[in-house]
Image: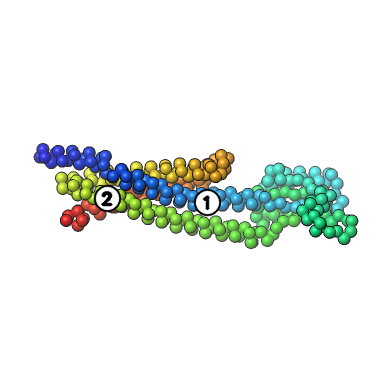
Amino acid sequence: MDYLHIFNAKFKRLAKYKVSHPGFYAFSIASLAILLMLCGILISGLFFSDHYARKFKEDIVLLCELKDDDNEADVEKVTAFLNSENGIVEGSVEFVSSEDALEEMYGLLGEDATMTDDENPFADMVEFSIESDSFTLEYVEHLSSRMEKELPVRQVHYPSDYFDNVFGVIRMAKHYLMIFIIVALVMTGVLIHHIMRLNVVAQQGQIRTMELVGAKPGFIRRPFIRRGLQMGLRAWLAAVILSAIAWYVLLGPGMFLGWLFSVPGITGMLVLLLLSILVCGFSTWLAVNRSLGSSIMQE
């Protein structure tokens, strides 16, 4: 009994402190961190795709062409209407006179801008942009109809082909990105599973020794699962730190903070945390169970 007690105490310390070789443990942490970081970059693509899609929409300029007999009061009436309207980008409303429009055309086209007569083909206009959340065909058509009926506006010009072509491509690209991210998460989970399995296989000698001295399966599993959960958490922390440094350098402080506190950013970090801890813990539990009493251990 004293002999078994000595061996039990010895292998209890062994299970607690030497479940994994330090070199292999560090290699496993690094591998897990790289996998999580790459997966996090893909998830961050949701934030950037949404960010640039919103920016693209809000950079589109709509032109409100005023009637020929407009005066300063008409211009103020149109600009006041747009500034008070929900869905208009703040600070985007700007009056452009016909002379300014003609000068801008000459500046853009240069010598190619030939005129057949001296008449200015442009009318006075008010340009504005619409917020991305409101930029729908129904909203634009409703707004145009109201302005043409209630205000001294001849016509509102907007790129109608964008709604079916450009915006449709953007939506489709985002859907494909979501599918790709889901596939990447599944593949990352499979790779994490194999890394944790190899980490347990490398310690089968210790599992066999603990079985020989009469250790119960729960006692054997406990230190391995605890170490697996620690590895998952540490790998996640390493991946978050590396990703944060990379994005800070590439994006700068302003956009980095926007990414960090965005819904896709926070959701992505939580998804990777759950993926890392759950897969590491379950994979370790499964690998230890397969090693207990296996034919390899009973040679």
Name the residue tied to disc 2.
202
SS label for mark 2: loop
Please, which residue is most extreme toward the left here? 1
Query: Residue 264 — which label?
Result: none
One can see residue 157 in this view: yes
Question: Residue 50 location in percent, x, y?
Answer: 57, 51
Residue located 41% across and 47% down the image? 33
Q: Indicate the quadrant where residue 172 lies.
A: bottom right
Disc 2 residue type? Ala
Please, which residue is most extreme toward the right here? 118
In the visual, does 200 lie left or right of 134? left
Count of numbered tags: 2
Question: Residue 214 location in percent, x, y?
Answer: 16, 46
SS label for mark 1: helix
Residue located 51% across and 56% down the image? 177
Question: Residue 235 location in percent, x, y?
Answer: 39, 44
The Cα atoms of the two marked residues, 2 and 1, are separated by 37 Å
Q: For the residues labelled 2 and 1, say whether their Cβ atoms are less than 8 Å apart.
A: no
10 Å neighbourhood of mark 2: few (<14), some, or many (≥20)?
A: some
Disc 1 residue type? Gly
Question: Residue 135 location in percent, x, y?
Answer: 65, 53
Name the residue tied to disc 1.
45
Coloring scheme of the render? rainbow
In the visual, does 5 lie left or right of 164? left
Specify the quadrant that holds the C terminus: bottom left
Residue located 69% across and 43% down the image? 90
Specify the quadrant that holds the N terminus: top left
